[in-house]
């Protein structure tokens, strides 16, 4: 069986006290049994749902694409980061109306202010201040959120960009947009962070939100 590399996400989750194990697209495709069903309750992910075809139109990832919905059907819960973490849920057929937006291009990053719109009662951001900062690399937001979901955090409608390399001409629909949201479907609880709160293991101030998201999702 292919051995999955331990990345910063797995390292941070272990630092937070979780029993975290990595998996990979190769493992999902090649393992004799579904690695997502090996006793873990929660999937943390920042990648897009695996494509069905390669650039030449040949079929690929048939096994992985079948195994991911099996995890959700078995009651598995989910935390996603970056645009891939959001679009993954749509690709897996778990939600509709969840759409990420991004600045496009390479080399755009920085620090943003965000508002705790969920307030003290939010199961994700309840312990955070009314306004805080986050690392965005690359900058991503949620341009649409399912109507049944709760929005926990938004970018302010103005003055949200603190520092970095993100030209105003590429802000698009970012001002006032959601950046953290949570909800559920018939089988699973799901949390989406528009940006990666475990990015390079740097944003330690954001780690507690991941921990509370995990405890809520797996409750």
Image (cartoon, rainbow, N blue to C red):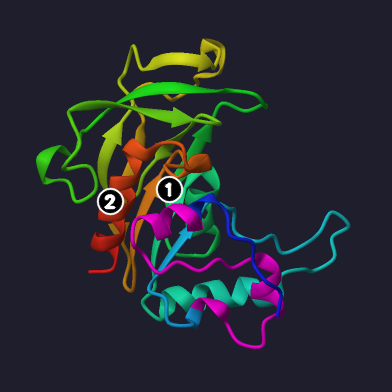
Asked if labels 2 and 1 touch by Cβ distance under 8 angstroms, the answer is yes
In the rendered view, would you say 110 is above or below 10? above
Q: Place residue 6 in its image quadrant.
A: bottom right
Inspect the magenta stretch and tell me whether residue 27 lies in it: yes
Where residue 32 sits, quadrant-wise, is bottom right
Residue at the image point whose x is 35% and y is 59% from the top:
190
Answer with mark 1 or mark 2, whichever residue precedes in sequence. Answer: 1
What residue span does the magenta drawing correspond to? 10-36
Mark-to-mark CA distance, 1 and 2: 10 Å
Q: Which mark is residue 149?
A: 2
| Residue 26 position in % (x across, y down) | 71, 69
Image spot of residue 115 (x, y percent): 25, 27
Q: Is residue 89 above or below residue 145?
A: below
Residue at 38% across / 30% down in the picture? 134
- SS for tag 2? loop
Q: Nearer the viewer, residue 18 or 90?
A: 18
List the residue tagged with mark 1.
98
Label 2 CA crowd tier, 10 Å (few <14, some 14–19, many 20+): some
In the picture as drawn, the residue positioned furthest to the right comes out as 56
Residue at the extreme bottom of the image, as rendered: 32
Q: Nearer the viewer, residue 212 or 147?
A: 212
Disc 1 crowd, CA 10 A, few/some/many (<14, 14-19, 20+): some
Residue under the point 43% across and 40% down: 194
- In reply to whether residue 32 is colored magenta, the answer given is yes
């Amino acid at each position: 069986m292919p051995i999955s590399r331990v990345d910063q996400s797995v390292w941070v989750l272990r630092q937070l006290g979780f029993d975290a194990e990595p998996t990979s697209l190769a493992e999902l495709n090649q393992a004799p049994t579904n690695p997502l069903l090996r006793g873990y309750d929660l999937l943390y992910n920042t990648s897009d749902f695996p494509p069905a075809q390669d650039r030449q139109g040949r079929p690929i990832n048939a096994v992985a694409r079948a195994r991911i919905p099996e995890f959700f059907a078995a009651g598995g819960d989910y935390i996603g980061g970056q645009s891939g973490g959001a679009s993954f849920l749509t690709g897996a057929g778990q939600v509709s109306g969840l759409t990420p937006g991004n600045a496009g291009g390479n080399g755009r990053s920085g620090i943003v202010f965000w508002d705790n719109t969920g307030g003290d009662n939010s199961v994700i951001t309840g312990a955070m201040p009314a306004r805080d900062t986050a690392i965005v690399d690359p900058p991503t937001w949620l341009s649409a959120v399912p109507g049944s979901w709760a929005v926990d955090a938004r970018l302010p409608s103005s003055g949200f960009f603190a520092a970095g390399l993100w030209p105003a001409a590429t802000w698009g629909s970012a001002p006032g947009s959601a950046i953290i949201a949570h909800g559920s479907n018939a089988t699973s609880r799901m949390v989406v962070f528009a940006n990666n709160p475990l990015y390079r293991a740097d944003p330690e101030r954001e780690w507690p939100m991941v921990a509370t998201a995990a405890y809520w999702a797996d409750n």
